[in-house]
Amino acid sequence: MPTLPVAAKPEDAGVDSARLQALFARAKQEVDAGNIPGCQVALGRNGVLAGSATFGSSRHGEAERPVTDDTLYTIFSSTKGVVSVAAWQLLEQGKIRLEDKVADHIPEFKTNGKDVVTIEQALLHIGGFPQAPLGPPKWATREGRREAFARWRLTYEPGTKFEYHASSLHWVVVDLVERHTGMEWHQYLRECLIAPLGLQDHLYIGLPRELNQRVADIYYVTEPTPPPGGWGEVTPYAILRFNDPGQREIGIPGGGGIGTAGALALFYQALVNGGASHDGNRILKPETIDMAIIPRTDDRHVDLLWGKPINRSLGMMVAGDRENMPYRGFGTACSERAFGHAGAGGQLAWGDPESGISLGFTTNGFAGEIEMRDRTRDLSTLAAQCAI
């Protein structure tokens, strides 16, 4: 299996060794305290990994093994960040425009009042269809997905408020991909996003069944309790369904990605370095990224979990002001322009275009919301402080 590019020493990538070790120590603390069974943490800068570390163990069915750099984890909503970049590519190529109605491209959106939803509203999670149902077996075929789109209804007037679209939005994104590229969406993501960055053995959206033995099974370290806003679509049952090989193979585009911390850190390295990998393979133009990470929501758009303004760009969360950035999957030391997408269970994936730092963190153990929030804040803060 090809290895990911790693600097000979952290300083070669512009990273302070002692600060990097402090980041790793904080991740290890979570394992030692029993908050999670194991984890990976990886930090990128200047196009490569400055370093990575693994701690603890992972379950694979009845087997338990030490975590390695090649252990794969379900990255949950960090998948959204990857899939959203496919929409950025369509925007760059002029195949879609933010002001377009979704129904201009997906005729099934002409039903039940959905014809007013714009591409921009959809990508900001203010499109009004947060709980639109789509599950097996319909999600497995293009025809089944489009039948579901036609039945979907709005639950609020688009643009008037934020409500997290846990899975529905990114089914729309991949349908746009299929309509405008002529490629099956898994193939497109692999060939046009993941493989050009050299991540094809470390990041999957649609996992081949023969690779299931590499995936750490998910489990709850503590008894699950509902978050402040309630379970919504992301119930404990829904979380544990991601242990199913069939669901991993589908690769739900809003939350079913499988990958390593190193792959996430390098994915965001490409984005903070103008859209190209360390060896020059380009997936986007710099100006497209600059456009896509501009915050586009306002103070009406509040996260129901924490009651904080969400600060969303096109498919991504943006760090924004120092007071609120910890609630958005960042610490307290990133720049306001840092962007990315966290995932359930405390997965972290972000990049900072000001410092050039990127972070990936993956785990398979679910603990309480407060523990995950504190871990997110600490890891992201320590990561942001690593730049020389």
Image (cartoon, rainbow, N blue to C red):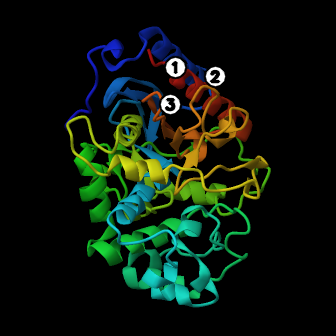
User: What's the distance in space between the residues labelled 2 and 1, CA to CA?
Assistant: 16 Å
Front in this rendered view, residue 196 or 68: 196
* Residue 145 placement, left or right of 151: left
| Count of residue discs | 3
Query: Dot 3, crowdedness within 10 Å: few (<14), some or many (≥20)?
Result: many
Q: Do labels 3 and 2 touch, CB within 8 Å? A: no
Badge 3 or badge 2: first in the primary sequence:
2
**Which residue is tagged 2?**
33
Front in this rendered view, residue 196 or 274: 274
Please tell me which residue is depicted at 54% across the width and 31% down the height of the picture. Answer: 37
- What amino acid does circle 2 point to? Ala
- What amino acid does circle 1 point to? Leu
The answer to whether residue 252 is above or below residue 305 is below
**Which residue is tagged 3?**
38
Please tell me which residue is depicted at 20% across the width and 36% down the height of the picture. Answer: 279
Q: Position of residue 47 (x, y in %)?
A: 31, 31
Q: Position of residue 55 (x, y in %)?
A: 46, 24
User: What's the distance in space between the residues labelled 1 and 3, CA to CA?
Assistant: 15 Å
User: What's the distance in space between the residues labelled 3 and 2, CA to CA?
Assistant: 11 Å
> Is residue 157 at all visible to an observer of this figure?
yes
Q: Give SS at disc 3.
A: strand
Q: Nearer the viewer, mark 2 or mark 1?
A: 1
Badge 1 or badge 3: first in the primary sequence:
1
- What amino acid does circle 3 point to? Gly
**Which residue is tagged 1?**
23
Badge 2 or badge 1: first in the primary sequence:
1
